[in-house]
Image (tube, rainbow, N blue to C red):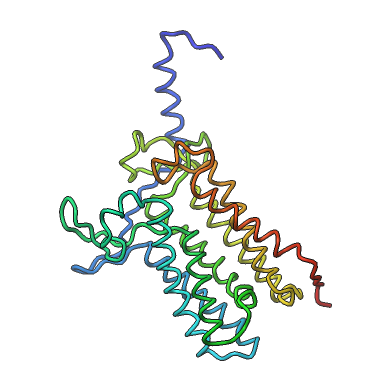
Amino acid sequence: MLVPVGQEKNTKIVMERINFFLAIPWNPDPELLSLGPISIRWYGLMFLVAFLGGLYFTNKILISEKYNSAITNKLFFYVIIGTIIGARLGHVFFYDWGYFKDNLLEIILPFKFKPNFRFVGYSGLASHGAAIGITVALWIFCKKIIYKPLLWLIDRVVIAIAWGGSFVRIGNLMNSEIFGTTADLPWGFQFLRATYLENPNIPRHPTQIYEALWYFLNFLGLYFLFWKTNAKNKQGFLTGMFFVWVFGFRFLVEFIKENQVDFESTMVLNMGQWLSIPFVLLGLFLVFRKIKFRYKV
């Protein structure tokens, strides 16, 4: 519809007001509880739920494979270390090496030293780095503890990882980070704490919710395949399904996500998409290898 030149400004104001009332204002405090110098943040709580739930499901699976809880507890430790180190280094090297190459101590310490010393926590974590870190940790665990093929173990751990990924994305939502591009939709979120945006009132895709729901659906799908089919007997099949489902969706959702770092604006595909492609290809290879499985009867 053509709008007379004199009415363009008024029309823009009206549309912004309409979008404001259709959207969902989002302005939660990332800090859940504060007791003196100690604070509990939503993000940390979601990480705890992710790991504890993952521990429960992995323990249940390994007990069905005749392993005891002591093995699960050791595995839990390996996965935590692999997740944290991998996710942190993934962010450093994939997204922000330009900054960290001049601030090496900040890679391992939860502080910023410039322009003034302050505690900031580990705000930079990358899921692709976490995937690599977990894989390395599981490889070491297989070699040192259970003497099983790596794919055998990953097939049993991806169920817990899908569970955990869902809650980590909810943590991102509570932090008002990793959100989407502008969205003229009734469920668009106004990320009012993102003051670095030119206009935080403009509704955006709540991509954290999209990903959280997709991770949870992946968890349900993998859980069903493990317990109700013979999929676990085809080594690498569940791992392949996880890679295709999770990183395939990650590739697509990146089209409606804001770039996390400035240099991505000059890329045909952003960093998240480039990093997802190898996982998807590996997943397809694992899924379509000529090893059959059937439903239990």
Is residue 67 shown left or right of residue 177?
Answer: right
| Residue 47 point in image, percent of width and height | 42, 67
Instruction: Tell me what residue is drawn at x 42 percent, y 21 percent.
Output: 12
Seen in the picture, residue 229 relative to 177 is either above or below; the reply is: below
| Residue 17 point in image, percent of width and height | 41, 29
Instruction: Tell me what residue is drawn at x 47 percent, y 58 percent.
Output: 169
Q: Nearer the viewer, residue 267 or 72?
A: 267
Is residue 136 shown left or right of residue 112?
Answer: right
Seen in the picture, residue 163 relative to 204 is either above or below; the reply is: below
Instruction: Tell me what residue is drawn at x 53 percent, y 76 percent.
Output: 138
Seen in the picture, residue 137 relative to 283 is either above or below; the reply is: below
| Residue 142 point in image, percent of width and height | 56, 82
Q: Nearer the viewer, residue 108 or 206?
A: 108
Find residue 82 and report its image quarter.
Answer: bottom left
**Quarter that holds the C terminus:** bottom right
Q: Nearer the viewer, residue 275 or 245?
A: 275
| Residue 249 point in image, percent of width and height | 60, 52
Find residue 1 and report its image quarter.
Answer: top right
